[in-house]
Amino acid sequence: MKTDYPQELAYTDTSWQRFSVDYNYPVSFSHALFDPQNLVLLDTVCRLEANKCHRVIVFIDSGVVSAMPTLLDEITHYTQMHAKHIDLVAAPIVMPAGEQIKSELHYIEQMQKRLSDENIDRHSYVIGIGGGALLDAVGLVAATSHRGIRHIRIPTTVLAQNDSGVGVKNSVNLFGQKNYVGTFAPPFAVLNDYDFIECLPERDKIAGMAEAVKVALIRDAEFYVWLEQHVDELATFQRAAMGYMIKRCAELHMQQIALGGDPFETGSARPLDFGHWSAHRLETLTRYHLRHGEAVAIGIALDARYSVLCGLLNPGADERICFLLEHLGFKLWHPSLESRNSRGKYAVLQGLTDFREHLGGELTITLLESVGQGIEVHTMDESQVGLAIEWMKRRQTP
Ligand SMILES: NC(=O)c1ccc[n+]([C@@H]2O[C@H](COP(=O)([O-])OP(=O)(O)OC[C@H]3O[C@@H](n4cnc5c(N)ncnc54)[C@H](O)[C@@H]3O)[C@@H](O)[C@H]2O)c1
Ligand SMILES: [Zn+2]
């Protein structure tokens, strides 16, 4: 190579900085977490420093508080009973529920201000109790305040217990884009309590099951068949079946993060986001009228049909998947699926662009080559997506 710059600038000395960090955190399944006899939370807080009194701040989802009116007192009582080790710096702070907390950035600042006011330091604990949306927002607060404070997640929805709560991501929405601002930050611990699920509205019990169908379809044929065999118990929210579904789904998500080779998604793939390119767009198009899980169920049906149309998946497998989703209680049609942009194109197709831009590299979408086996593709044919949408509409028309 020709070098026409001064000799001293032609010299470059590069040394490589290299280290790795071993992440580990427990994911516990328990119940009656705030019964003073239950030591899971106490042991978690004392894990690294057993003889100290730890400062703890709690942010809690307003929907959980409405459904469990005695919970705030139970939390306070628990910390009083274990006051030697837990210093609850303020009464649990109730935050807006659902997508609202992720859609208005001032809530992040409001929570950060509380951390600052209460002198929460890097050895203190930020506990989030709530659905996936609240956990995403509190996780971002914990990850960014003081560049990272220990964060304990207590997920309270099916979706948060079987998927989002056990993961390493947090985020809020900005510029009309889902999850635009966020970090990868593993939690200090995840404590699941099935008692929360009992209080959940049926709509949210159903919504969270979409992630179980998703992960079974791309990773675990045996689990998929189990879901089919137990569909009646799941559709009526039987505790034993729901408990197994949540745990198995959480395990599959944990395996992907630990063993998939790219826990912080630096590559071009988001392997667990089958059905999500359209789901995220549908959530935005419906102004979050659709729950995340409800949009994912539609996205799964769309991508299953598309997989058949492009010859990857056996004909009939799409119907089989829709049958399971519908028996679990999902509606697989929403009018926003056929809304068009100013150029007459299906508006949902913007989801492909968003996906590509989010990943930064090549478009990578997971489709199905069989029930239980995902396959990555790098292009989607827009006209075939259109045919898949028309098929879904026809299925809904009596
Ligand atoms: N970080 C990740 O890896 C990840 C993965 C998947 C989804 N997510 C995010 O998770 C969010 C969806 O989470 P979600 O499905 O848990 O919904 P959600 O957090 O929006 O909660 C749904 C509703 O349930 C209420 N609720 C929560 N727990 C309750 C309980 N025990 N009893 C009664 N009501 C209760 C909430 O107040 C809310 O009204 C989306 O924002 C999605 O983007 C994140
Ligand atoms: Zn999801």
Image (cartoon, rainbow, N blue to C red):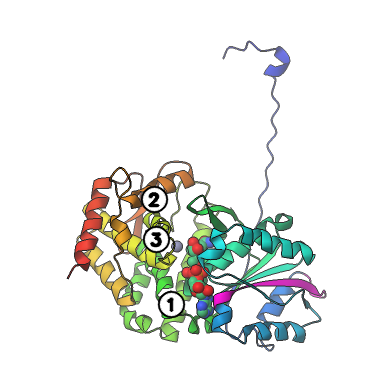
Which quadrant of the figure contains the N terminus? top right
Which residues are the magenta region? 49-63
Mark 2 or mark 1: name the one nearer the start of the chain.
Answer: 1
Whether 210 is among the magenta residues is: no
Residue 105 on image: x %, y %:
60, 57
Quarter of the image where one finds residue 11: top right
Which residue type carries mark 3?
A: Thr
Measure the alpha-carbon separation of dots 3 and 2. Answer: 13 Å
Which residue type carries mark 2?
A: Gly
Taking the view exactly as shown, the residue that stands out farthest to the front is: 342
Residue on which disc 1 sits: 205
Confirm whether residue 311 shows in the render.
no
Taking the view exactly as shown, the residue that stands out farthest to the left is: 398
Q: Secondary structure at mark 1?
A: helix
Which quadrant of the figure contains the C terminus? bottom left
Q: Secondary structure at mark 2?
A: helix
Residue on which disc 3 sits: 286
Residue 310 on image: x %, y %:
23, 50
